Image: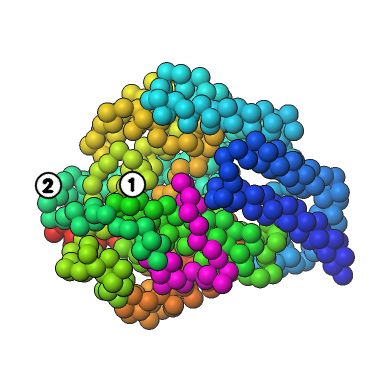
Amino acid sequence: MSKHYEALLNQLHKINDIEKAMAVLQWDQETNMPAMGAQRRVQQLTTLSEIAHTMFTSAQTGELLAGALEEQAEADFDSTHASMLRVTQREYNEQRLFSAEFVSRKSAITGTAGAAWAQMRADNNFADFKKHLEAAVAIAQETAEIRTYDTEPYDALLSQFERGMTSAELRRIFDEVKRATVPMLQAIAQRSDRVDDTILQQAFPVAEQEAMCRYGAESIGYDFNRGHLGEVHHPFSTSFGRDDVRITTRYAPDYAMSSLFGTMHEAGHAMYEQGIAEDLDRSPLGEGASLGIHESQSRLFENQVGRSLGYWQAHFPKLQSLFPQQLANVEVADFYKAINKVQPSLIRVEADELTYNLHIILRFELEQALINGDLQVADLPTAWNDKMQSLLGVTPPSDKQGVLQDVHWSQAAFGYFPTYTLGNLYSAQFMESAKSQDPRIEQELAQGKNTFLLAWLRENIHQHGNKYDAAELCKRATGKSLSAEPFLQYVRGKFGELYGL
Ligand code: ZN
């Protein structure tokens, strides 16, 4: 009855094995590999990526897919069979759009631009980076044309990361966030002395930070029997299958909280992957629904749980026992305030919950203008600085702390940044629904626990893997389409109280 489907699945399993082997090589590259190994590693990854791409886009896969679609025509939309075929077919059609020539040309352009970015950022040299960024914008525009779109090219880029989302919809939602956040920030700036975070700026020994990060990840539900915590320069999480999902962090000797919140963030991503249903593993369904949904899980645990008063009332004694010299005489209420200080800054990755989205909205607005041709790369540094001033009230003293701070544009990853703010918005909407559907969640969170919350996420988000688009998943879990309102309510409540607004 399911002969074709089984044959297709067998092929998808093998392709997935190759992709996961690539993930192992990439993880090793970031964590253990000596720098001299870089050249061989690029060759190994390129070879595996070509094998996976060729297998997936082959006529053989196409025939298996066509046979399976015919055989499973009656399968229910929610079933694993129907979802597997729906997602595989979409992926197959998309990957077949790009010629081998285009793929290798794009990879050469972004490879060169990425290396140039690292050097020219270090040298604060936008003038020489300009031509690389122009090439990256051009290849992104070409990508949009190949993928095709209804109204604007940016939609085609956005859909690579957040299927189904449009620029128009994002503008509507992001404008709402901007309108609410900018005046709040101005009010907070008048009262910045209400929150003091100097207790966080002390020496925190790295050995104890490691113990703290392990404790933090475990306390929110990350399963170390199916996980691993490593150390890297740029933290990430990666899955080799639902039973081996690894996280990484970075330790700053004079600021303990960045390693802890970074760990909780990556653990949130990893718990999503650990919670995907077993029968979806080793297939195109065995991953998150979108980057925005993925980010919702990391931000939920980093911020809504990790930066909550309930969590710290329960877990602060543990932190004090690890750092008695630094924290023995600190009240938990003061610690809670310190980790939530709002401070407009130049650098996105260091931003607090309130200013973070403005860093993203700035990039979203500039990206659209670049892709539509309304803004030239040569004018980008000035446009960046103007927007920093109008949104956050700060102006970068150099391009290094401004337009050159992220690697992503050199990778032609336009349409990617918005998923960060989408993650913040989804996380608040999920939390609101979870609490209203199960009152035990709120009680537990107030005691620093989250087993019922995790159970809700497993049931409504995690187990489904990549079966549904983000919009559909959101509607199924919360009964509503994505809205900025739950997030705005959350920040109004939290920061209103912290700053007496
Ligand atoms: Zn993340």
Q: Amino acid at mark 1?
A: Glu
**Quadrant housing residue 311:** bottom left
Please tell me which residue is depicted at 48% across the width and 40% down the height of the picture: 167
Indicate which disc, 2 or 1, sits on the residue closer to the N terminus: 2
The residue pinned by badge 2 equals: 190
In percent of width and height, residue 372 lies at 49, 27
Q: Is residue 7 visible?
A: yes
Is residue 334 rendered to the left or right of residue 228? left
Q: Is residue 425 visible?
A: no
Is 251 drawn above or below residue 278 in the view shown? above
In percent of width and height, residue 299 lies at 41, 58
The foreground one among 52 and 458 is 52
Q: How is the image coloured?
A: rainbow
The foreground one among 153 and 378 is 378
Is residue 44 rendered to the left or right of residue 493? right
The foreground one among 134 and 251 is 251
Q: Spatial distance from mark 2 to mark 1, Cα to Cα? A: 21 Å
Please tell me which residue is depicted at 56% across the width and 72% down the height of the picture: 225
Q: In the structure shown, which secondary structural element does the residue marked by tag 2 occupy?
A: loop
Q: Residues within 10 Å of mark 2 (few under 14, many from 20)?
A: few
Q: Amino acid at mark 2?
A: Gln
Is 235 drawn above or below residue 361 in the view shown? below
Q: In the structure shown, which secondary structural element does the residue marked by tag 1 occupy?
A: helix
The residue pinned by badge 1 equals: 350
* Residue 247 shown in magenta: no
The foreground one among 77 and 496 is 496
Q: Residues within 10 Å of mark 1 (few under 14, many from 20)?
A: few
Please tell me which residue is depicted at 74% across the width and 41% down the height of the picture: 47
Is residue 31 rendered to the left or right of residue 180? right
Is 122 drawn above or below residue 224 in the view shown? above
**Quadrant housing residue 156:** top right
The magenta stretch spans which residues?
212-236
